[in-house]
Image (cartoon, rainbow, N blue to C red):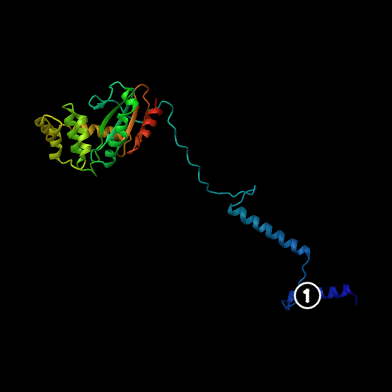
Amino acid sequence: MGKEDNITNKTNSIQENLKGGKMSEGQTITIEKATLWKYAFFAVVALFVILLFTGTFSGTGNVINNNPTPPPSPTPTPSPGQAAIKISADDSDPVLGEEDAKITVYEFSDFECPFCERAYTGAVTDLKNSEEFKDGEVNFVYRHFPLNSIHPRAQKAAEAAECANKQGKFWEYHDNLFMNQNALDIASLKAYAGKIGLNQKEFDSCLDGGEAEDKVAKDLRSATDAGGRGTPYFVILNNNNGKTTSVSGAVPYVNIESAIASIK
């Protein structure tokens, strides 16, 4: 018997053992190439069908999301010249600087707010010392924004400042309040009036009678209309072209200076 007959007999024997489930340990299995290709073909077809129905593969090899998340909409940009902040001059406002200045810096503030005191000694002081202010290009307006829910003495302090304003001494009184921020009780508010030479009887009557409540409420509405959410809050208005911008917080004066430059 030749070598070819031996190989044929061994192959037949293995195939019979496989069919009968009697493959013994140490024996070698020989599988024809055609059989391998057939199994591979069916495996590829099955994989393709699975991917097709699960929707996780595209014809180009990219992952598909059957429920794609739409891209975020772009943030709308105001059209050129559109006023983004609602604010206007008021004859009842105390103004520091030239009345007809090109730029007005409005500060919405709270006399009991520690960050407002920081702005008073920082950015506001630097503004008053700036060349733009000294040259009459920029003026400064203070408006009341008492945060009554967390600063219980801010409301009467604001009213007291307006009572001083009726006698033409708003800014002197304003400075005294920030320099004595920890003493804003009624007795102290009245004492500051005497300290700066106000008519005490008129001042006391104004404060006790709530004569300045409407002005403070008006400023408060102005603050919220202008987008104020906390103190201090600055709104810068170009009185010539109507452009506006805002700055929030006790920031350095350079921030306000940059805001002024942006609307010239």
In this picture, is 26 found above or below 233?
below
> In the image, 158: left or right of 6?
left
Q: Residue at x 78, y 75 (%)?
A: 14
Quarter of the image holding residue 142? Answer: top left
Query: Dot 1 lies on which element?
Result: helix
Q: Percent x, y for residue 72?
A: 48, 41
Q: Which residue is mark 1?
A: 14
Q: Residue at x 11, y 29 (%)?
A: 199
Out of 28 and 53, give the one closest to the viewer.
Answer: 28
Q: If the image is split into quadrants, where does the N terminus sit?
A: bottom right
Mark 1 burial class by Cα count in 10 Å: few <14, some 14-19, many 20+: some
Q: Percent x, y for residue 120?
A: 28, 36
Q: Residue furthest right?
A: 1
Q: Amino acid at mark 1?
A: Ile
Q: Percent x, y for residue 208?
A: 12, 35
Q: Residue furthest left?
A: 201
Out of 233 and 73, give the one closest to the viewer.
Answer: 233
Q: Residue at x 61, y 48 (%)?
A: 62
Q: Percent x, y for residue 99?
A: 27, 22
Out of 33 and 105, give the one closest to the viewer.
Answer: 105
Out of 79 and 71, give the one closest to the viewer.
Answer: 79
Q: If the image is split into quadrants, where does the C terminus sit?
A: top left
> In the image, 66: left or right of 142?
right
In this picture, is 42 found above or below 194?
below
Quarter of the image holding residue 165? Answer: top left
